[in-house]
Structures are given as structure tokens and as C-alpha cells.
């Protein structure tokens, strides 16, 4: 029996690859780096399935480069790097990996929140540099977290998990979302407010929205000016949700207290000015980077691929319409 062929654009945890090897002939990108569009097209030649990453440009040219292509499985929750419309036109299912990284990502948002509020990274550098000469009453003042107002922008899976973790800190939780979140309102007495009200009242603003045209530069100069001087901004969603240059200026002028970022507007490039700011903590897009979570993502992506190439509906298909027209 001739096995179907799958191209994996970068090595993922072994448990996921083992699932694929049992069913298909695999070709895996041998380099530990992001492939160019041309390299992906070359690797896709003669393949039935494509398992890709959020960093891969899967546009109409890639999708139409291989007539055998029958399934695209993304090793990520987001899929704005994939031209889903082009895939749907070709009748190709596209899947993602939702749910499994909810806790890891919400945990990272909290890690960033505390790190910025209490100036952890700045204080670590200060101490390692030998500047610590003993306790001092004015040394490294940060922000309290307990009893403060938490603003959650986007109350989906991750936003909800993030807000629920505020229980132990007796916070006043505000949220912005298209729908009423009954779970948050019941569990943490959260209040659904307008975007402007959230920005004006929150001590901590955490972003948990997808990147779509309406969320591009959701936080810009105007929004930053609405925030309080003690506000901490957290972004673990997508980089372009924040106007990076406007944020840099607000941080330099200390119009807000600080920012914790895991994603960037022009990723993987990060503005040099941002790297120099003590009131910004920057992470290498690693919110889901726990052994358990990345392994679960690999298994889910692999299982989606198996389902799709066997002609079944993948559990996490993002373009279900491809099955309605068959």
C-alpha cells in the first residue's frame, strides 16, 4: 500500500511525529528555523498533507503549488498566516489546536503581570550588577496587585481562564467582549463594560483577542492616553493588536507604568527601542512553551492531520464549509 505523504515545516514534539509516522510518509524540515515561502513550496511537492506553524506564510501561492494537497494542520491556535479562503476554494480542510494552550498562555499573562508590576526583571539585573547595598525605603517601588482593577480585553477561552485566576487577589474584574460571559460574572463578579471604560478604570489591561482586521492596532496612541499612569499593559495575543511605536513612546514618557509582551508587531523583529526600556518585559513568543502543552499541541495537530487525510472531518476544522459543498 502506498502511504500518503506529509510535509512538516519544523520539528515538533516527538509524540505528535510518532502518530504521523504510523500513518504516513513524513518529510520534516531539517533546519531549526522558519522556512521561506519558496522552501515550503519545494517541501510540499508531491505531498498530501501540510503540518505548519504560525510563523509559516501559507498563502494562495503555497496552497495552489501542489495539486495533491488535501489537508493543512496548523500547530497553533491562530491561523491568520494561512489563506483559509484559498484553501476552502480548493476544498482543503484547515485545522488548528485550540483549548490545549489555554492555561499555559493565561499563566504566562499572569507571570508577565506580576513581573512588570513588581519590576522583577529590572530588580534582578540591578542585583546581579552588584548595586544592591541593603534594604532601602525607596528601592524598586512597584505596583500592588491585590484589590486592584483588572481589565480583560477578549473573554474567550484564554481571557476567561486568565480572569478566573484573579480570584485569590480580590480584584475588581472588568471585561470587554461581544457576548456576556456568565462564567466570569458568576465566579469573579466581573462586569461587562465598554472598551473606553475598561481602559480608563483598569490598573492592569490584558489582551486576549484574535488578530483580525478589526483588532489591528486596537491599542494605539489614543487608547494609551486613556489609561492611567499606573496601568500595566499585557499582550499575549498577537503583536499587531498593539501599535508598537505608540507603546514605546508611552513607555518612554512613563505615561503608563509598564508593559509585558510575548508577541510583537513585526515578529520576529523587535524594535531596538523596546529592548532598551526597563519598564517593558519582553518574552520570545513562549506563552505556550511548557513541555505538557507543546506536546498536547503536537498530538492534536497530528490527529487532525490523520482525520483530514482519511476523509473525515477534523475535530478542530476552522473551515467547515469545505464539507458542506462536497
Image: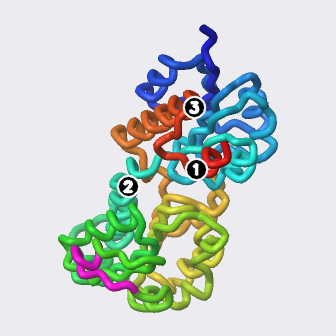
Q: Is residue 194 left or right of residue 321?
A: left
Q: Residue at x 44, y 38 (%)?
A: 300
Give the extent of the magenta segment.
Answer: 184-192
Query: The N terminus appears in which quarter of the rendering?
Result: top right
Q: Reply yes or no: does residue 186 show up in magenta.
A: yes
Crowding at mark 1 (Cα within 10 Å: few <14, some 14-19, many 20+)? some
Mark 1 secondary-structure assignment: loop
Residue 46 on image: x %, y %: 74, 22
Q: Which quadrant would residue 225 be assigned to in this image?
A: bottom right
Crowding at mark 3 (Cα within 10 Å: few <14, some 14-19, many 20+)? few
Identify the mark at residue 320; answer none if there is no mark: 1
Query: The C terminus appears in which quarter of the rendering?
Result: top right
Q: Reply yes or no: does residue 7 show up in magenta.
A: no
Q: Is residue 234 left or right of residue 273?
A: left
Of tags 3 and 2, the one toward the viewer is 3
Residue 172 on image: x %, y %: 27, 84
Whether 191 is drawn above or below 271: the answer is below
Mark 2 secondary-structure assignment: helix
Identify the mark at residue 311; answer none if there is no mark: 3
Mark 3 secondary-structure assignment: loop
Q: Is residue 131 visible?
A: no
Mark toward the start of the polypeptide (3 vs 1): 3
Contact between marks 1 and 2 (CB within 8 A): the answer is no
Mark toward the start of the polypeptide (1 vs 2): 2
Identify the mark at residue 73; answer none if there is no mark: none
Separation of disc 3 and disc 2 at Cα? 29 Å
Residue 234 on image: x %, y %: 45, 69
Q: Residue at x 50, y 90 (%)?
A: 196
Residue closer to the observer: 133 or 36: 36
Amino acid at each position: 500500500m502506498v502511504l500518503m505523504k506529509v510535509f512538516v515545516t519544523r520539528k515538533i514534539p516527538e509524540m505528535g511525529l510518532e502518530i504521523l509516522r504510523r500513518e504516513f510518509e513524513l518529510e520534516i524540515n531539517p533546519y531549526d528555523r522558519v522556512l521561506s515561502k519558496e522552501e515550503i513550496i519545494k517541501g510540499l511537492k508531491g505531498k498530501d498533507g501540510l503540518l505548519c506553524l504560525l510563523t509559516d506564510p501559507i498563502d494562495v501561492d503555497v496552497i495552489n503549488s501542489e495539486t495533491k494537497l488535501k489537508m493543512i494542520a496548523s500547530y497553533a491556535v491562530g491561523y491568520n498566516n494561512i489563506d483559509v479562503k484559498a484553501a476552502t476554494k480548493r476544498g482543503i480542510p484547515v485545522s488548528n489546536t485550540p483549548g490545549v494552550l489555554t492555561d499555559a498562555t493565561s499563566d504566562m499573562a499572569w507571570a508577565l503581570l506580576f513581573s512588570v508590576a513588581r519590576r522583577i526583571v529590572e530588580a534582578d539585573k540591578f542585583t546581579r550588577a552588584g548595586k544592591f547595598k541593603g534594604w532601602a525605603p525607596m528601592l524598586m517601588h512597584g505596583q500592588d496587585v491585590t484589590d486592584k482593577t483588572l481589565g480583560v480585553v477578549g473573554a474567550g477561552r484564554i481571557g476567561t481562564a486568565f480572569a478566573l485566576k484573579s480570584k485569590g487577589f480580590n480584584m475588581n474584574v472588568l471585561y470587554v467582549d461581544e457576548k456576556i460571559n456568565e462564567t466570569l460574572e458568576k465566579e469573579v463578579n466581573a462586569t461587562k463594560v465598554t472598551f473606553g471604560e475598561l481602559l480608563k478604570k483598569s490598573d492592569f489591561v490584558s489582551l486576549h483577542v484574535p488578530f483580525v482586521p478589526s483588532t489591528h492596532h486596537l491599542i494605539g496612541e489614543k487608547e494609551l492616553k486613556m489609561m492611567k499612569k499606573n496601568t500595566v499593559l499585557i499582550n499575549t495575543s498577537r503583536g499587531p493588536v498593539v501599535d508598537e511605536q505608540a507603546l514605546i513612546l508611552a513607555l518612554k514618557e512613563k505615561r503608563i507604568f509598564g508593559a509585558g509582551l510575548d508577541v510583537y508587531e513585526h515578529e520576529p523583529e523587535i524594535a531596538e527601542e523596546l529592548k532598551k526600556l526597563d519598564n517593558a518585559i519582553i518574552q520570545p513568543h513562549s506563552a505556550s512553551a511548557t513541555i505538557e502543552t507543546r506536546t498536547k499541541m503536537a498530538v492534536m495537530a497530528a490527529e487532525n492531520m490523520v482525520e483530514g487525510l482519511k476523509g473525515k472531518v477534523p475535530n478542530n476544522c476552522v473551515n467547515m464549509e469545505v464539507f458542506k459543498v462536497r
